[in-house]
Image (tube, rainbow, N blue to C red):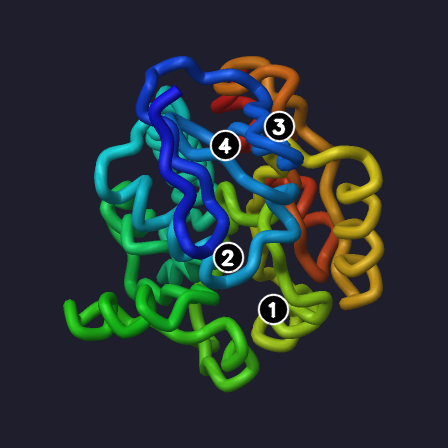
Amino acid sequence: MTHEILPSGILVATDGMHEPVKALGQQNYIHLTGGIYLPVPMHELSLPQLQDVNRLRDDGFKSGLEQKNDTLKIMVANAVQDFSEDRALTIVDVGSGQTTIAPYFSKISRYVSIDIDPHVVATLNAQGVESHAAENIREIGLNNDGINVLIALYMLQFRIDENLFADLASIMRGHDVMFANLYRIDNDRKEWLRERIVAAGLTIGPEIADTKISPGRQVFWTVAKDQGAADRLAAMFGAKLN
C-alpha cells in the first residue's frame, strides 16, 4: 500500500484501493472519501485534522461524494428559493468551506459564510465574501426584512461546539429556517444533535429519508423556531427529492 501519514494523523492512501478500514500497526484508519482515512471518528477530528481533510479534498482527492454534494446543493437551493416566495433572501452557509453554496442560487440579497477554520474565513474575506468565525456567530447581524435561511451541508458529522445551535438560534427570527443533512451519523450522535437543537428552543420538521443521493447514508432535517416553517421547508425539499 502506498500511503503517507500526515503530522496531524490523517492517512493519505494513493493505491486506489478504498477499503472501509485500513489497519497500520495498532491503528485502524476509517475511510472518509477518495484516499483520505481518519484515525478517529469524524466528530472527534481536531481542527488541524479537519484542515488537512479540507485541504486534501480541495487539492484533488475527489470522489463520488463531490458530485453528490453538487446534486444536493442544487436541490436545496431550489427548495429554499421556493420557500422564500420572492422575499429578500439571506443565505447563511454554516460550515461553508472555501467552496460555498452561493453560486447555486439565482437570486439572493446577501450571503454569509460561517466556518470553524480561520484559514477559510480569512480566504473568503480576502475574496470579498462575507465570512465569520464560528465562535462569533452571536455577533452577526442578519437582516430584519425578507427571510434568513441557514444551510449546513456535510458538516454535522464533524466536531461541533455543543453551543452551536444555541448560537444559531440567537440570530434566527421566528420564520427563519435551517436546512441540514446528517451524513454518516449514527443514532447516538443523531440524538446528541437533536437534544441540543431542542435545548436551543428550535423545532425539527419531519425527518426526510434520502432516497436519491446517498440512500441509507444520510437523512435531512429542517429546523426553525416555528414548527410550521420547518414543516413547510421539509415538504418543499421532499417534493424536490422525490
* Disc 2 element: strand
Q: Which numbered mark, 4 or 1, is in the foreground of this view? A: 4
What label does residue 218 carry, if any? 3
In this view, the residue in front, 12 or 240, is 12
* Disc 3 element: strand
Note whether 85 is above or below 142 in the view shown: above
Question: CA–CA distance between discs 4 and 3?
Answer: 14 Å
Question: CA–CA distance between discs 2 and 3?
Answer: 19 Å
Q: Which numbered mark, 2 or 3, is in the foreground of this view? A: 3
Q: Residue at x 63, y 40 (%)?
A: 232
Residues under numbered marks 4 and 3 in contact, where contact means CB atoms less than 8 Å apart:
no
Q: Image quadrant for the N terminus?
A: top left
Residues under numbered marks 1 and 2 in contact, where contact means CB atoms less than 8 Å apart:
yes
Which numbered disc flags the more N-terminal residue, 4 or 1? 4
Residue that lies at the very extreme toward the bottom in this rendered image: 139
Which numbered disc flags the more N-terminal residue, 3 or 1? 1
Q: Which numbered mark, 4 or 2, is in the foreground of this view? A: 4
Residue that mark 4 sits on: 32
In percent of width and height, residue 154 lies at 50, 42
Q: Amino acid at mark 1?
A: Leu
Residue that lies at the very extreme toward the left in this rendered image: 127
Question: CA–CA distance between discs 1 and 2?
Answer: 9 Å
In percent of width and height, residue 216 lies at 65, 17
What label does residue 168 carry, if any? 1
Q: Amino acid at mark 4?
A: Leu
The quadrant where residue 42 appears: top right
What label does residue 150 carry, if any? 2
Residues under numbered marks 2 and 3 in contact, where contact means CB atoms less than 8 Å apart:
no
